[in-house]
Structure formats: C-alpha cells, structure tokens
Image (tube, rainbow, N blue to C red):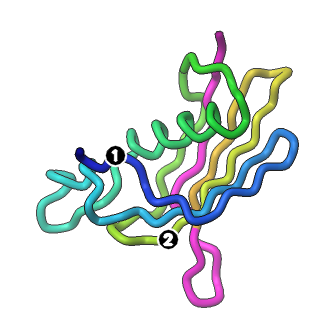
C-alpha cells in the first residue's frame, strides 16, 4: 500500500487544540512528481493532513467549506520533522493550522491557514 500520511511520533490534545509531531517520510506518495529534482510536500497535502488530524483528534465537522487564509512560507522537504498545531473554534466553525519546525535556534513556519468546516 502506498504511504499517504506522515509517521506521527507524538500527539498532545488539550481542549480545542492538538499538536502533532510528525516525520514527513520521503516515501510518501505525494512527493512523486512534485518536483523531480527538488521534492517538496504539496500544499494540498498539508491542508488534507490538517483536516484529517483535526477530525481524528478534535472531532471537528468533516465537511470542508473553504479556505479563509493560507500562507506557504517555507517548503517541507522529505524526511523533515515538523509540528502541526491545530486550533478549533467551535463557535465560528473554523480550524486554524500551522506547520513549523526548529532550525538551529529559530522557529521556521512552513505554512499556516484557516479553513471553514461544517456538517
């Protein structure tokens, strides 16, 4: 079976927030063809994973209703270890997400955004 999701190494869930530490394995199918000489994790994969893990760990509604804000700042490369932060606002039915990692003494934000969800 083809690998579509990262290897999760840690999960912390508190109320309406979840933080997942993951290894973005080089064997993930989404790296193929994106791009041949410089593979990076597609933005659509990052959005898909944020929604998938929000449903799994925060019990958010499963229906994607659109993006409100999204920024792709630094590529996520094969075998990177990243942290996915999820915050669910039940009243507004909005999920905020952020992918980040540590590089030496600084925090690198790879991408962030907000999506509208519903039933």
- Counting every numbered tag in the picture gives 2
Residue 99: mark in rendering: none
Most extreme residue toward the front is 1
Residue 4: mark in rendering: 1
Q: Is residue 65 above or below residue 3?
A: above
Q: Is residue 117 above or below residue 72?
A: above
Residue at horizontal 69%, vertical 46%? 86
Taken as a whole, is the magenta stretch helix, strand or loop? strand
Counting from the top left corner in percent of width and height, residue 73 is at 49, 59
Q: Disc 1 on helix, strand or loop?
A: loop
In magenta, the rendered stretch is 101-119
User: Looking at the image, do the residues carrying marks 1 and 2 touch, with CB atoms under 8 Å apart?
Assistant: no
Give left or right: position of 44 versus 30. right
Q: CA distance from mark 1 to mark 2?
A: 16 Å
- Magenta span has 113? yes
Q: Is residue 27 above or below residue 52?
A: below
Observer-nearest of 59 and 88: 59
Residue at horizontal 68%, vertical 57%? 11
Counting from the top left corner in percent of width and height, residue 28 is at 29, 55
Counting from the top left corner in percent of width and height, residue 107 is at 64, 75
Q: Disc 2 on helix, strand or loop?
A: strand
Q: Nearer the viewer, mark 1 or mark 2?
A: 1
Residue at horizontal 15%, vertical 51%? 33
- Magenta span has 13? no
User: On the rendered image, what quadrant is the N terminus found in?
Assistant: top left
Circle 2 residue: 81
User: On the rendered image, what quadrant is the C terminus found in?
Assistant: top right
User: In the rendered structure, which disc, 1 or 2, sits on the residue that comes first in sequence?
Assistant: 1
Give left or right: position of 50 versus 30. right
> Quadrant of the rendered structure where residue 61 is?
top right
């Amino acid at each position: 079976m083809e690998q579509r999701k990262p290897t999760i190494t840690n999960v912390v869930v508190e109320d309406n927030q979840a933080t997942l530490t993951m290894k973005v394995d080089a064997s993930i199918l989404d790296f193929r063809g994106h791009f041949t000489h410089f593979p990076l994790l597609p933005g659509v994969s990052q959005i898909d994973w944020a929604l998938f893990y929000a449903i799994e760990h925060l019990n958010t509604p499963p229906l994607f209703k659109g993006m409100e804000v999204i920024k792709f700042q630094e590529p996520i490369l094969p075998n990177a270890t990243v942290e996915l932060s999820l915050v669910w606002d039940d009243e507004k039915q909005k999920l905020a997400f952020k992918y980040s990692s540590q590089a030496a003494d600084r925090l690198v934000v790879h991408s962030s955004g907000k999506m509208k969800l519903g039933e």
